[in-house]
Image: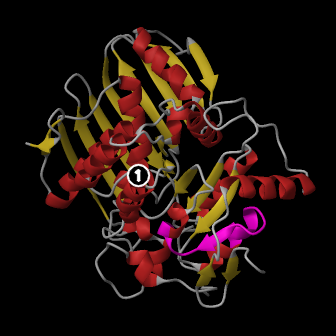
Amino acid sequence: MGNKARYVVEGQTMSDTRKTTRREFITKSTTTAAALGLVTAVPSVGVLGANEKIVLGVIGTGGRGTSLMQEAKKQGAAIAAVCDVYTERLERARKIAVEDAFATDEYKRVLERKDMDAVIIATPDHWHHDMLIDAVGAGKDVYIEKPLSKTIEEGKEMVKAVRATDRVVQVGNHMRSGQHWAHAREVIQSGVLGRVIWVRAWDCRNWTKNDPFAPPVEIKGKIDWKKFLGPAPWHEFDPHRYFAWRWYWDYAGGLMTDIGAHMLGLVHWLMDVDGPRTVAANGGHHFFDYWETPDVVHSVLDYGTFSVVFSVEFVNGHDGLGATFYGTDGTLVADGASFAVYPQHTTGERKPIEQWTATAETSAHIANFLDCIRTRKQPNSPIEYGHRVITAAHLGNISYRTGKRVSWDVEREEIV
């Protein structure tokens, strides 16, 4: 293979004997894409230049990381490097990327490369803090999956580190790029609902018959467990902890943060608020015995002028996903992919005064990120938004784990 990047599945040997320049990589990837009939029009000139592709690295190539990588490629970006601690996923990602894409299990080797404009970080939550700070320190723009942080303090440090640079950071709260939600915000801000006094948000799924994060019967390839743990406390290898890390306190915050990043994010954006005054949460384990975090959990948040009830469970999918905004003059119902506004005072059959449907969110979110790399504008979901939203979810977990209502000083970002 000469001086080209080398990847060996056996064991975990990856090496790159020389650094490819950005222009060399673009030339090679464009030639390869042309041979496969994949070359698309390049966006107009920005910071990068009219004839240059945006070149990305992907750190964390599980289901979400792979999906984001494929979407970025679809929109014309090139993938220079992929990184994962599980050889099976790493090899799959390398095949999705361009020929001879660099593959490694050391994320800092990705950040060292000079041929990339940005990275996608889609690792477990407990790695987000270190990787984001290292990435912006290395001069990379970043798309970082939600939830932004594992703790409130980590989030504060991440905001500070990003704002000490000129890097573009898009947090993966992809609903922020949904035009259907943008219109819902316009409706609320227009005053047609009157004063919104209560918001109910929920996400209900049934994973009891088909748990997508259940470990496979046979683990193919090798997992570097030590690298997976990283800054987390030591624990003997457990396939549940690796494949279903979201439900373990060492690595994430369970349903409250995983789903709260979306649903509480909508509340913050549509209602134009930065955080709650008080949070009280309750829930429990009712089906998934191997989870540490609850499989049914509820949070009640007071924002001063309105209250929120947020419920999430993965044992019954009847209600699906949605949010309802209750105002003194009307109600906005977002039920799955459909949206409707109803007047408050009616007799007989209730008929909506306006209706609309959902549009693609993830593709729009990636498009916004790529555009901001070129224009240097702030993305739809900037670091401060991602931090404030997940802070509300973290407060829910603090309440759940302590059994106490939590009071929050929004301005000082401190528990009272």
What residue is at 89 percent from the left and 52 percent from the top? 34
What residue is at 52 percent from the left and 16 percent from the top? 350
Is residue 270 placed above or below 288 in the rendered structure?
above
* Residue 228 appears in the rendering: yes
Foreground pick, 302 / 50: 50
Question: Is 133 on the left-hand or right-hand side of 35?
Answer: left
Question: Toward which corner of the image does residue 177 lie, by quadrant?
Answer: top right
Q: Circle 1 sits in a helix, a strand or a loop, which is it?
A: loop
Question: Is 287 on the left-hand or right-hand side of 243?
Answer: left
Query: Label 1 amino acid?
Result: Pro
Q: Position of residue 240 (x, y in %)?
A: 45, 78
What residue is at 52 percent from the left and 69 percent from the top? 109
- The color scheme shown is secondary structure
Q: Which residues are magenta?
A: 92-108
Count of numbered marks: 1
Magenta-colored stretch includes residue 105: yes
Q: Position of residue 367 (x, y in %)?
A: 63, 37
Magenta-colored stretch includes residue 290: no
- In the rendered view of the protein, which quadrant contains the N terminus? bottom right
Residue annotated with mark 1:
147
What residue is at 58 percent from the left and 27 percent from the top? 180
* Residue 201 appears in the rendering: no
Is residue 54 placed above or below 227 in the rendered structure?
above
Foreground pick, 107 / 209: 107
Q: Position of residue 280 (x, y in %)?
A: 20, 46
Is residue 394 placed above or below 290 in the rendered structure?
above
Is residue 120 placed above or below 90 in the rendered structure?
above
